[in-house]
Image: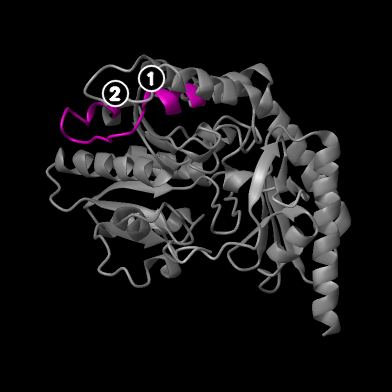
């Protein structure tokens, strides 16, 4: 890593020079199968023709004017997202953290409108919502907090997938105005809640007049085999955040709201210099076009079931494997020990994966993965996990 860069990352010893579909090539010409998709960003893979064309065409016409003026592509994108999500209005930013900041601000406006001076938001242990001061304060991971105290006040943390814990907070606090959750925890280890959890949260929010806010930054845009992960249930949120796969690598975030929540922002309340500019909105529109025309939401569902089946067939019953779980193309293999070294071992084997929560191998392959490529992912991951566990047991 260059001495000119701040030491915020510890990059692996590789730099990619080009990509195509589910594949990347390094400067030496070695090819890698990408089962991480830029951490759920490149859902359409690399160098997608439709996205590349949209970026090139828009860049030759207009990149940026600011939100002081109307932006046609922004309006079109907002209408498309609102329609597919069943929401009313959209705010565009540059990232998932910025989208979640907007959601947090909506919750506080919602609370102040009810004369609550210090509105509080219920969040979950093991969550990840970003690295700005407000979103890291909402995040349920001490490692993200460390060194950045004092944290932003106004968050009440409860165990994830524990409806009773939320109900208990409701009994003892009158300052709660919203609940902010991931429908599936990504950084927390691909943690999938009980089928009735989100619907129970929806009922509690309705009962107490809270906003139900879902962070779909990682799970959204087809990743889990639905447009949005909440659509596996009936628990439609009042506020929903998106980023990652929405731009296929072009930075864009979105905060969607419906009902009264969609009316909370007024001119001057919130803004973003670059948010929703013509370039990023053109890219996102091309992403939505490709997902719809190629039926990639259904494809993610079918591929996810196939991959999960293959992983179970290869790893079930193996000593050291605690669980294999997933929803669509968001999969996790939980081991009984830290396994971060698997990332480098996979890289050597020409495969990109991730390890999160110290002991969960996370797979987030692109939605355009072919059957053959999915089979290769399964075979390579199974071989890597088997070798890792056998070596650990031998030692």
Q: Which residues are magenta?
A: 262-283
* Residue under the point 51% across and 54% down: 161
Q: Which mark is residue 251?
A: none
Q: Secondary structure at mark 2?
A: loop
Task: Tell me the quadrant of the picture where the C terminus can be found.
Answer: bottom right
Q: Position of residue 62 (x, y in %)?
A: 38, 19
Q: Is residue 278 magenta?
A: yes
Question: Is 345 left or right of 286, judged from the image as shown?
Answer: right
User: Disc 2 designates what residue?
Assistant: 65
* Residue under the point 65% across and 36% down: 46
Coloration mode: one colour
How many marks on residues?
Answer: 2
Q: Is residue 177 above or below residue 49?
A: below
Q: Is residue 210 visible?
A: no
Q: Secondary structure at mark 1?
A: loop
Dot 1, crowdedness within 10 Å: few (<14), some or many (≥20)?
Answer: few
Q: Is residue 293 visible?
A: yes
Q: Position of residue 377 (x, y in %)?
A: 80, 48
User: Disc 1 designates what residue?
Assistant: 62
Observer-nearest of 334 and 234 = 334
Q: Is residue 197 above or below residue 77?
A: below
Q: Position of residue 272 (x, y in %)?
A: 28, 36
* Residue under the point 78% across and 54% down: 350
* Residue under the point 55% across and 41% down: 219
Q: Position of residue 59 (x, y in %)?
A: 45, 23
Marks 2 and 1 in Cβ contact (< 8 Å)? yes
Q: Is residue 129 above or below residue 111?
A: below
Observer-nearest of 194 and 36 = 36
Question: Is 206 left or right of 113, judged from the image as shown?
Answer: right
Dot 2, crowdedness within 10 Å: few (<14), some or many (≥20)?
Answer: few
């Amino acid at each position: 890593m260059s001495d000119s860069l701040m030491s915020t990352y510890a990059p692996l010893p590789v730099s990619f020079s080009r990509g195509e579909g589910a594949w990347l090539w390094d400067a030496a010409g070695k090819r890698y199968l990408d089962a991480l998709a830029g951490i759920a960003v490149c859902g359409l893979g690399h160098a997608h023709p439709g996205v590349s064309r949209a970026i090139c065409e828009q860049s030759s016409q207009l990149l940026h004017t600011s939100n002081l003026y109307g932006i046609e592509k922004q309006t079109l994108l907002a209408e498309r997202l609102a329609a597919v999500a069943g929401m009313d209005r959209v705010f565009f930013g540059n990232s998932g953290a910025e989208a979640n900041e907007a959601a947090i601000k909506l919750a506080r406006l919602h609370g102040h409108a009810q004369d609550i001076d210090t509105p509080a938001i219920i969040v979950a242990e093991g969550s990840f919502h970003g690295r700005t001061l407000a979103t890291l304060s909402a995040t349920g991971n001490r490692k993200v907090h460390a060194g950045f105290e004092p944290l932003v006040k106004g968050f009440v943390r409860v165990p994830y997938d524990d409806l009773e814990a939320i109900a208990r907070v409701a009994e003892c606090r009158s300052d709660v105005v919203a609940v902010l959750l991931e429908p599936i925890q990504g950084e927390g280890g691909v943690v999938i809640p009980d089928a009735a959890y989100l619907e129970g949260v929806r009922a509690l929010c309705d009962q107490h007049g809270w906003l139900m806010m879902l962070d779909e930054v990682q799970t959204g845009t087809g990743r889990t085999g639905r447009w949005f992960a909440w659509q596996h249930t009936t628990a439609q949120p009042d506020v929903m955040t998106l980023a990652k796969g929405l731009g296929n690598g072009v930075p864009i975030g979105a905060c969607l709201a419906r009902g009264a929540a969609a009316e909370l922002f007024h001119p001057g309340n919130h803004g973003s210099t670059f948010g929703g500019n013509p370039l990023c909105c053109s890219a996102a529109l091309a992403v939505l076009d490709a997902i719809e025309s190629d039926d990639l939401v259904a494809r993610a569902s079918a591929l996810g079931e196939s991959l999960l089946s293959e992983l179970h067939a290869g790893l079930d019953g193996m000593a050291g494997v605690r669980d294999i779980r997933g929803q669509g193309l968001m999969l996790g293999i939980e081991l009984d020990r830290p396994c971060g070294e698997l990332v480098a071992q996979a890289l050597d084997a020409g495969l990109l994966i991730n390890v999160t929560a110290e002991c969960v191998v996370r797979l987030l392959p692109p939605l355009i993965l072919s059957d053959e490529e999915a089979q290769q992912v399964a075979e390579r991951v199974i071989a890597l996990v088997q070798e890792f566990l056998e070596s650990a047991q031998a030692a």
